[in-house]
Image: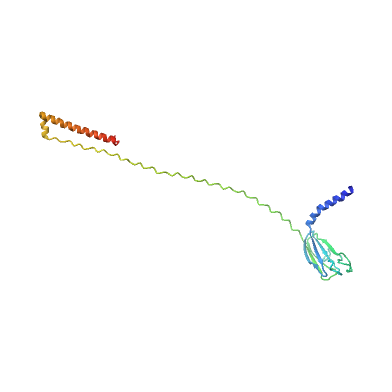
């Protein structure tokens, strides 16, 4: 059990790390024909890998992947035993720094290629969601209370107080002969009668005036 414990732990650790490494690196394949690299130019990022492969259809040709600056060399690459130099069918190289790396084939004149290595683009940080601005509740405008309409005051009708007309009392004038005849027995009685009649008329006139004034509220 102890002898199996260490390899098991190593295997579990490798399985946990392998997806992370695979996700961070890329492998690009370049195919070797009789006289060319396809594609002749590739662009990769730092820590990416390029694999050169000779297909089985290329028989009897010897190839190589040799850096122009002497940084790397694959040795002889071939698809079968017809290549006098022999060699592997594929070769891979991982590029750990940026730059332009030109290479060529030692066996085929004019067969060349280039690998351009660039820095990995930074992962864009997620754009923070904008903070919603608080919604301002509009202040309700006060509803103007209706102004009470002033009803016009009824104009006081001036009641005309009827003026009581004082009836004109006509005092009959006595003739001189009547007054003169008062010295006698009959003349004196007729004079008293006239005076009494005048007084009665004046009393009636005053009484009528008072009644009229009471009726119309003037007294």
Residue drawn 13% across and 29% down? 189
Quarter of the image holding residue 23? bottom right
Quarter of the image holding residue 79? bottom right
Instruction: Specify whether 218 is left or right of 73.
Output: left
Instruction: Specify whether 171 is left or right of 38.
Output: left
Quarter of the image holding residue 158? top left
Q: Position of residue 136 (x, y in %)?
A: 59, 48
Q: Position of residue 1 (x, y in %)?
A: 89, 47
Q: Position of residue 202 (x, y in %)?
A: 20, 33
Q: Nearer the viewer, residue 144 or 8?
A: 8
51 w.r.t. 146: above or below: below
Number of numbered discs visible in the structure rendering: 0
60 w.r.t. 188: above or below: below
- Image quarter where the C terminus lies is top left
Q: Nearer the viewer, residue 109 or 139?
A: 139
Colour treatment of the image:
rainbow
Residue drawn 10% across and 31% down? 181
Residue drawn 22% across and 33% down? 204
Q: Position of residue 24 (x, y in %)?
A: 78, 56
Which residue reaches farthest top? 185
Residue drawn 26% across and 34% down? 211
């Amino acid at each position: 059990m102890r002898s199996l414990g260490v390899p098991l732990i190593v295997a579990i650790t490798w399985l946990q790390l392998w997806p992370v490494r695979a996700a961070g690196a890329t492998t690009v394949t370049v195919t070797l024909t009789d006289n060319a690299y396809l594609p002749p130019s590739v662009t990769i990022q730092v820590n990416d890998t390029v694999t050169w492969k000779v297909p089985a259809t290329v028989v009897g040709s010897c190839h190589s992947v040799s850096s122009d600056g002497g940084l790397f060399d694959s040795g002889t690459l071939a698809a079968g035993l017809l290549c006098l130099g022999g060699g592997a069918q594929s070769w891979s190289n991982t590029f750990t720094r940026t730059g332009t790396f030109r290479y060529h084939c030692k066996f085929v004149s004019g067969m060349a290629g280039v690998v351009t290595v660039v820095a990995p683009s930074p992962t864009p940080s997620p754009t923070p969601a904008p903070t919603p601005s608080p919604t301002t509740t509009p202040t309700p405008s006060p509803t103007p209370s209706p102004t009470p309409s002033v009803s016009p005051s009824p104009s006081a009708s001036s009641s005309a107080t009827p003026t009581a007309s004082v009836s004109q009392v006509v005092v009959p004038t006595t003739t001189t002969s009547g007054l003169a005849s008062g010295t006698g027995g009959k003349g004196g009685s007729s004079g008293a009668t006239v005076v009494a009649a005048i007084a009665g008329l004046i009393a009636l006139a005053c009484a009528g005036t008072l009644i009229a004034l009471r009726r119309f509220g003037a007294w």
